[in-house]
Amino acid sequence: MAAVDSPCIGICQLDLAADLCIGCFRTRDEVAVWGTASDEVKRDILAKTRERRVDSKERNLR
């Protein structure tokens, strides 16, 4: 299985109210553990970031 790529897109700014990076939708803790996380944990984080991105877009449409 291939290595799990980071979701970082180079827009590294933390939304303090949501505790999420506005670029990749990871929490501060998820960003901190990424480098040492197992591929399984990374895939779990990626699933959460996809859900957060969708939720964010839906909120912005309202």
Image (tube, rainbow, N blue to C red):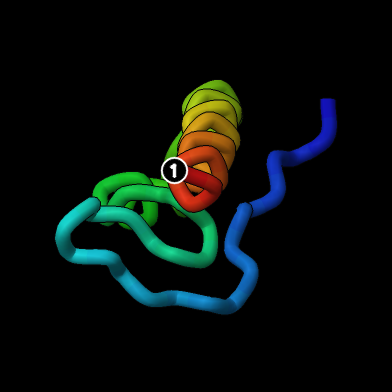
Q: Measured from the top left, where is residue 18 in percent x and y?
A: 23, 52
The percent position of residue 39, horizontal first and vertical second, equals 59, 30
Quarter of the image holding residue 53? top right
Res 17 quadrant in image? bottom left
Q: Is residue 22 left or right of residue 15?
A: right
Q: Which residue is mark 1?
A: 59
Left/right placement of residue 10 relative to residue 2 reads left
Query: Can the viewer see residue 49?
Result: no
Nearer-the-camera pick, 19 or 55 = 55
Snapshot quadrant of residue 46: top right
Q: Name the residue at 83% across, 35% down.
A: 2
Circle count: 1
Above or below, 41 against 11 in this view is above
Residue at coordinates 45% horizontally, 38% vertically from top-left? 37
User: In the image, is residue 36 above or below residue 23?
Assistant: above
Query: Residue 3, position in %: x, y?
Result: 75, 40
- The reply to whether residue 26 is visible in this rendering is yes
Residue located 47% across and 44% down the image? 62
Query: Disc 1 on helix, strand or loop?
Result: helix
Q: Badge 1: how crowded within 10 Å, few (<14), some, or many (20+)?
A: few
Looking at the picture, how far across and down is residue 42, in whole percent? 54, 34
- Is residue 58 rendered to the left or right of residue 29? right
| Quarter of the image where the N terminus is located | top right
Farthest front residue? 62
List the single residue furthest toward the left.
17
Q: Amino acid at mark 1?
A: Arg
